[in-house]
Image (cartoon, rainbow, N blue to C red):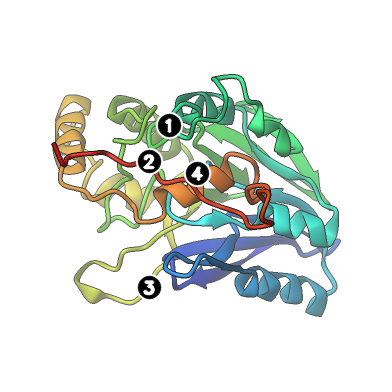
Amino acid sequence: MAVHVKGFFHEGTGTISYIVVDSEYKHAVIIDSVLDFDLSSGEVGAQFANKQLAFLQDNELQLDWILDTHAHADHLSAANYLRSKTSVQTVIGEGIKAVEGRFANVFNLGGLTTDLYQAFDRLLKEGESLAFGSASLTCMSTPGHTSDSLSYIIEDNVFVGDTLFMPDGGTARCDFPGGDAGLLWDSISRIHQLPAHYKIWVCHDYQPQGRELRYQTTVGESRSSNIHVNSQMDKAQYVALRNTRDKTLAVPKLLYPSLQVNLQSGVLPEPESNGMRYIKIPLTDNTH
């Protein structure tokens, strides 16, 4: 039995989404799909997600799960859209509860117990597994970038979300509420303890020095040559590097739209009395 990985690159957000196929029984899962969203016009579309649905149909694949590695801050999740088209359940880590708690006040969601996470069908815990066809995936909790971050292990493939990038790209930022560079070091250490031949599939590749886009490295390659986490670096040095670097990073341009949608599995805000949907953007008044 073997699985096949098909990557889909969303150019607008630089996101790489995956369809993982159980080749024997032709079942599949989707990881980290994306809605098309134009910030200037507010237009939301599903061209990217429809390409993935077409791939499933063209290859006669049965979709079993719609997975997110965390509540992304740089794109709108297509999970709810895909669910509406397939009736397949959406999945994320149970840490989404803590993320919602941290952002409930930011968006004035009515207190810390708004339960938007109930829009997800399944919340996974460390070590839980899900089957698809003759294959299965296992959840590894990998917090640090965000408190809900997890990785999916499918045979010898590890889908790490934003936890790791390609070795020349380093590691994820940790300056969002609930992020923690020390936790990220620990999470990456767990990933690096996996067998060296395991393939790591990243959610973003920022193409340092303009090199061609890459989706995949290996545990061995990442362990030996990741520019932020390697044998020449200890935990204290990494935390100092990560925290210093994070202070220089701009806020993701889709942070506020993404979180308001992704905290509830890609469900768009409810229409208001005029029939329009709105995204809130908190303002900081520095005019005084």
Mark nearer the viewer, 1 or 4: 1
Quarter of the picture containing the C terminus is top left
Question: How far separated are the C-alphas under marks 2 and 3?
Answer: 34 Å
The x, y position of residue 271, in whole percent, is: 68, 51
Quarter of the picture containing the N terminus is bottom right
Count of numbered labels shown in the rendering: 4
Choose between 135 and 271: the one closer to the eye: 271
The x, y position of residue 134, in whole percent, is: 82, 51
What residue sits right under mark 3 in the picture?
A: 213
For the residue marked with disc 4, what is the amino acid?
A: Leu
The quarter of the displayed image where residue 178 is located: top left
What residue sits right under mark 4 in the picture?
A: 259
User: Which label number is shown at residue 192?
Assistant: none
* Residue 160 seen in this snapshot: no
Mark nearer the viewer, 3 or 4: 4
Query: If you read the primary sequence from the N terminus, does the residue marked by circle 3 or circle 1 appear first?
Result: 1
Element type where label 2 sits in the image: loop
For the residue marked with disc 2, what is the amino acid?
A: Pro
Do callouts 3 and 1 mark residues in contact (Cβ within 8 Å)?
no
Which residue: 57% across, 45% down? Answer: 262
What residue sits right under mark 2 in the picture?
A: 282
Question: How far separated are the C-alphas under marks 3 and 4?
Answer: 26 Å
Rendered position, 24 above or below 104: below
Element type where label 4 sits in the image: helix
For the residue marked with disc 3, what is the amino acid?
A: Leu
Query: If you read the primary sequence from the N terminus, does the residue marked by circle 2 or circle 1 appear first?
Result: 1
Which residue: 51% across, 23% down? Answer: 101
183 left or right of 274 in image: left
